[in-house]
Amino acid sequence: MKTPNWPKWLSDAIIAAYRESIPVQEIADEIGRTVGQVRAKLVRENVYISQAMKAGRLKEIKAEEHGF
């Protein structure tokens, strides 16, 4: 049986930490993972929302990238 990359207890722990407003960098340092890995896990769990999405700017950013 394959060992999961993110055991349930670890996923639960990082989600709880993030919801307590602990910065992603701190969480990553504590568990020995990169910021990108932690952020990706939080995104997959529908917990992390980028600053652009929070501001409702995602469509604007995409349009700017394509020269609209």
Image (spheres, helix red, strand yellow):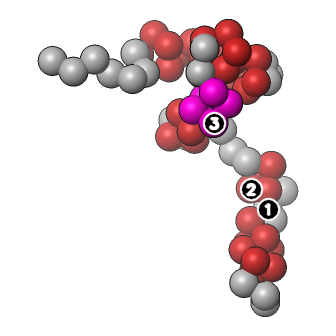
Mark closer to the chain start, 3 or 2: 3
Mostly what secondary structure, the magenta segment? Answer: helix
Which stretch did the figure color magenta? 34-39
Disc 2 versus disc 1: distance between alpha carbons? 5 Å
Question: In the figure, 59 relative to 3: above or below?
Answer: below
Residue type indicated by callout 3:
Gly
Q: State the quadrant of the C terminus.
A: bottom right
Q: Nearer the viewer, mark 1 or mark 3?
A: 3
**Residue 9 in sight here:** yes
The residue that appears at 67% across and 20% down in the rendered structure is 28
Query: Which residue is more in the foreground, 1 or 15?
Result: 1
**What percent of the width, then of the height, locates residue 56?**
79, 62
- The outermost residue toward the left is 1
For disc 2, the neighbor class at 10 Å (few under 14, some 14 to 19, many from 20) is few
Number of numbered markers: 3
Circle 3 sits on which residue?
A: 36
Residue type indicated by callout 2:
Met
Circle 1 sits on which residue?
A: 56
Q: Hey, which quadrant is residue 4 in on the image?
A: top left
Disc 3 versus disc 2: distance between alpha carbons? 17 Å
The residue that appears at 76% across and 24% down in the rendered structure is 25
Circle 2 sits on which residue?
A: 53
Disc 2 to disc 1: CB gap under 8 Å: yes
Disc 3 to disc 2: CB gap under 8 Å: no
